[in-house]
Image: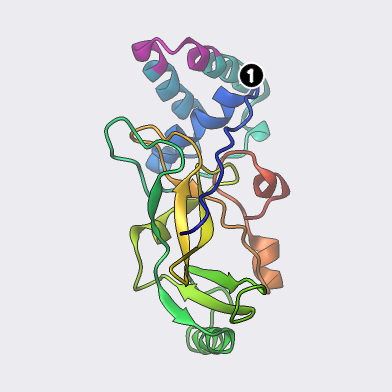
Amino acid sequence: MGTHPTYSPPPPTKNTHLTYTPPPQKHHQGNDGWDLAKALEVVKTTAQATNDTPSLTAATALETRLQRVGYAYFRLHPKGVGLQCCRKGGLPPLTLLDEYFGELHTPWRWFEIQDVVKKVTKDELPEFYNMTLERPKDDSKGYDCIFIEAAHKASFCSRMSHSCQPNCQAVVMAADGRLTVAMYTTRHIQEGEELTFDYSAVTESEKEFRAATCLCGTGGLFCMRGGG
């Protein structure tokens, strides 16, 4: 049997409502997703209808600040929603969602495929959904590494979006001698909330590194340094 991840609830912060409440609303605004004022209006309307005083207070304060200093101080990057929780009552922490399935490639084969894709598409940054699975060095078979490519053959977990402050995590587990990547929730997830995990993305492309912009909207490490 594999080892289950431990649950550590996120530490409370004074900016909780400003961090988590406006982003989902602006992500749903479509072509108006860059307009923070419209997103805040939705937050206020929803908060009034549900008697959510903290969210109403935070949105009103941010709206006042927006009117005073203008839009130049607020950078917005609307994005889509990859995967949402539809279960009544939500999902408790440490819930196994599924395994991260995909086509398996050895490192040399993976980079060979990438070279071909770049030559054919003339694109240095092709789309992919790969994850690296490493076999620990203390395994009886020794250290090894394979790439899991989930672009075409995969489970729904491969469509989860990145977040710098995620509510799920990828965990390497062993079951009956078989290594796999399992996706677990790290806290309680509300019905309708987006499921996310930290991609911990790295790249060998200088172009991608310099052009990358994180769109998760949580204000995490990648957001602050402008990449993700």
The picture places residue 164, in percent across and down from the top left corner, at: 60, 46
Q: Is residue 82 visible?
A: no
Give the camera-side residue of 202 and 205: 202
**Residue 226 position in % (x across, y down):** 68, 51
Looking at the image, residue 26 sits to the left or right of residue 141; the answer is: left
| Relative to 86, 162 lies left or right | right
Quadrant in which the C terminus appears? bottom right
User: Residue 59's x, y, as percent?
Assistant: 53, 19
Say which quarter of the image contains residue 99.
Answer: bottom left
Q: Which residues are magenta?
A: 47-57
Where in the figure is residue 182, as x and y percent of width and height?
45, 58
Residue at position x 55%, y 23% in the image: 17
Tag 1 residue: 65
Q: Residues within 10 Å of mark 1 (few under 14, many from 20)?
A: few
The chosen color scheme is rainbow
* Residue positioned 63% across, 34% down in the render: 74
Q: Is residue 49 magenta?
A: yes
So how many labels did they put on this image? 1
| In front of the other: 192 or 41 | 192
Q: Is residue 48 magenta?
A: yes
Dot 1 lies on which element?
Answer: helix
Q: Is residue 135 above or below residue 20?
A: below
Position of 213 relative to 92 (above/below): below
Does 193 sit left or right of 87 as displayed? Answer: right
Judging depth in this view, the residue of 110 and 174 nearest the camera is 174
Residue at 67% over, 74% down: 137
Amino acid type at image mark 1: Arg
Magenta stretch, overall SS: helix
| Residue 57 makes an appearance in the image | yes
Tell me: 44 left or right of 18: left
Answer with the quarter of the image where residue 89 lies.
Answer: top left
